[in-house]
Image (spheres, helix red, strand yellow):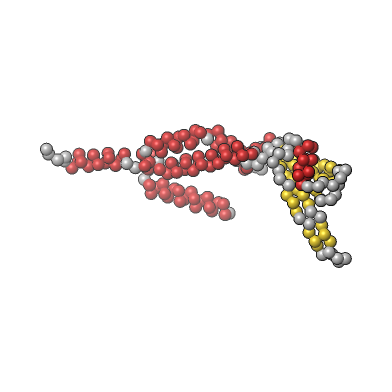
Amino acid sequence: MASLCWPVFYEARKMTRKRLPLHNNKWVRRIHAWAGFATLTLMLIYGLTGLWLQHRAVLPLPGPHTAKSSEEIVLSAPLASPDELKALLQQRYPDVIDEGRPQITPPQTLPTPSGPVTLPARWELRDVTLRQSLAASYVEGTLLVRTELQQANFAASLNRLHRGMGTGLPWQLVGDLAALAMLLLALTSLLMWNKLHGPAGRGIALLLGGALLTLVVALL
């Protein structure tokens, strides 16, 4: 049986090579499409809130604003522990205080012209939701708790949503999912570059140029 002539053999090898590269793999294209569609809504939220917050000082857009109010709670007896402070605040602000943990500043001894002075311990508790935030402070042994409540408008709530403040574990997991999806989109885009747009050298040049431009703009 006669062997294949050179042009036929060359074309056969060329066709074989087209099926081997990873950018030609259907699973790469599927992962790229699935990652994009599965996180499309989340990407839109991050993109729109990012544009809004980035250009609110230049464009006529309503910016984040918080209405602040303070209160002094007079006690009948000193609080015995930080847990009592948290229970008091949960009773007074049930919509704000949820998972906040008191932070304790231990007593400090400071020098003065008349001798050392010991400052009592200070208890602080902060908690944040999308719509509200509360900061409370109490000096151990006293009868006064100071609180500051902030009510966020819609833009401030979007700001917190974008930054993951006051959202809880479910939104953090969704944000991690979006980050993983962006990595998949970037990696699969690199793998599909040769197939869709041209030689690998041009893709590497664009990649390095974009990275250098990003670094220069970030350092300015």
Nearer to me, 56 or 1: 1
Residue at 83% x, 64% y is 116
**Can the viewer see residue 94 in this picture?**
yes
Question: Looking at the rendering, in which quadrant would you find the N terminus?
Answer: top left
Could you tell me how many numbered marks the image carries? 0
Horizontal side of residue 184 vs 110, given as left or right:
left
- Identify whether 104 is placed above or below 166: below
Residue at 47% x, 50% y is 209
Residue at 53% x, 42% y is 179
Horizontal side of residue 111 vs 99, given as left or right:
right
Q: Picture coordinates of residue 95 (x, y %)?
A: 73, 35
> Which quadrant holds residue 153?
top right
**Can the viewer see residue 64 in this picture?**
no
Q: Residue furthest left?
A: 1
Q: Picture coordinates of residue 136 (x, y %)?
A: 77, 45
> Which quadrant holds residue 99?
top right
Question: Looking at the rendering, in which quadrant would you find the C terminus?
Answer: bottom right
Horizontal side of residue 195 vs 89, given as left or right:
left
Residue at 48% x, 49% y is 210
Q: Picture coordinates of residue 34 (x, y %)?
A: 46, 34
Horizontal side of residue 91 vs 203, given as left or right:
right
Q: Picture coordinates of residue 204 (x, y %)?
A: 42, 49
Q: Residue furthest front?
A: 80
